[in-house]
Amino acid sequence: MREITIGQYYMADSPIHRLDPRVKLAGTFAFMLTLLFQKNFPAYVIAVLVLFIVVKMSTVPFKFIVRGLKPIAVIILFSIIVNMLFVPGEPLFKFWLFQITREGIVMAIGLSIRLSLLILGASVMTLTTTPNELTDGIEKAFGGLKRLGVPIHEIAMMMSIALRFIPILTEETDRIMKAQMARGADLDSGNLIQKIKSLIPILVPLFVAAIRRAGDLAMAMEAKCYNGSVGRTKMKPLVYQKRDRFAYAIILVYIAVMIGLAVLAPRLGFGF
């Protein structure tokens, strides 16, 4: 639980931290969307290089970002096994009713790389953007939807609060687990059913704590006369700087390169 990095903010003064949150949102969405439609390894190599450069510029320790992959290691491993066993193609190894195919191995490797890069890309955005900046960026970027009756401010506020609650609930879970272990609770031994039962003393107080924190937050917002986006002003209004326009240009170049690879790589024999 301590390894979750999405939703946390790493305080630093770097070129990535100083970028407009709208730029970081656009860059993250472009990074994710281009990865979802890629089926060639040259595109993954470019995505890794771009992510590495962004991480170095953000001054966030690379180990701190990579450890965010630990909580989803089980999901990645499950996806690899499913692809290796059930993707049809040239069989390499057979046992009982299952077979491992060459296409399944290639697909599994590509999927694991894609999932890892998606998590790392989202972690970089949240680590370099405060919840308030993220809320303002979402509201400003999608402000045109207000004309269609979409409560974009409320949606942005809910997303920001949800992301902010991730590290808070993680810390709360850690404290509850330590308290239960101090009382003699055994959380590690036993079979699968016993381990699931041992989670009940953790989940019940965790839900109670989450509801209590949500109630405290609602009372604090009411005490400060919060009534949504009506009549609200910004202490720090978002204004594009020269560095933001330059970052947009880099994002457009990255999108063009990835689209070009998606079209040309299969013709050159790099697709899978």
Image (spheres, helix red, strand yellow):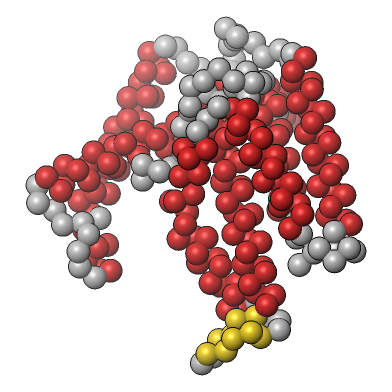
Whether residue 2 is situated above or below residue 88 in the rendered picture: above
Say whether residue 116 is left or right of residue 184. Answer: right
> To which quarter of the image does residue 190 belong?
bottom left
Against 174, is 103 above or below? below
Can you say which quadrant of the picture contains the C terminus? Answer: bottom right
* Towards the viewer: 17 or 45: 45
Give the left or right position of residue 134, taking residue 20 as reference.
Answer: left
Which residue is depicted at the point 75% across and 26% down?
247
Given residues 105 and 149, the one toward you in this image is 105
Q: Residue at x 28, y 69 (%)?
A: 192
Question: Can residue 149 be seen in this snapshot?
Answer: no
Against 156, is 196 above or below? below
Question: Residue 55 location, x and y as percent?
Answer: 60, 34
Q: Residue furthest bottom?
A: 96
Residue at horizontal 70 percent and vertical 39 percent from the top: 50
Screen quadrant of the N terminus: top left
Q: Quadrant of residue 151?
A: top right
- Can you give x and y, in whole percent of width and height, for residue 185 in the image? 13, 53
Q: Nearer the viewer, residue 62 or 120?
A: 62
Residue at 50%, 33% in the rendered image: 61
The answer to whether residue 272 is seen in the rendering is: yes
Q: How many numbered badges does the structure rendering display? A: 0
For this orientation, the residue located farthest to the left is 183
**Percent of width and height locating residue 106:** 67, 69
Residue 47 in the image: above or below residue 134 = below
Q: Is 209 left, or right, of 151 in this rendering?
A: left
Q: Pinpoint residue 178: horizontal percent, then vertical percent.
A: 19, 43
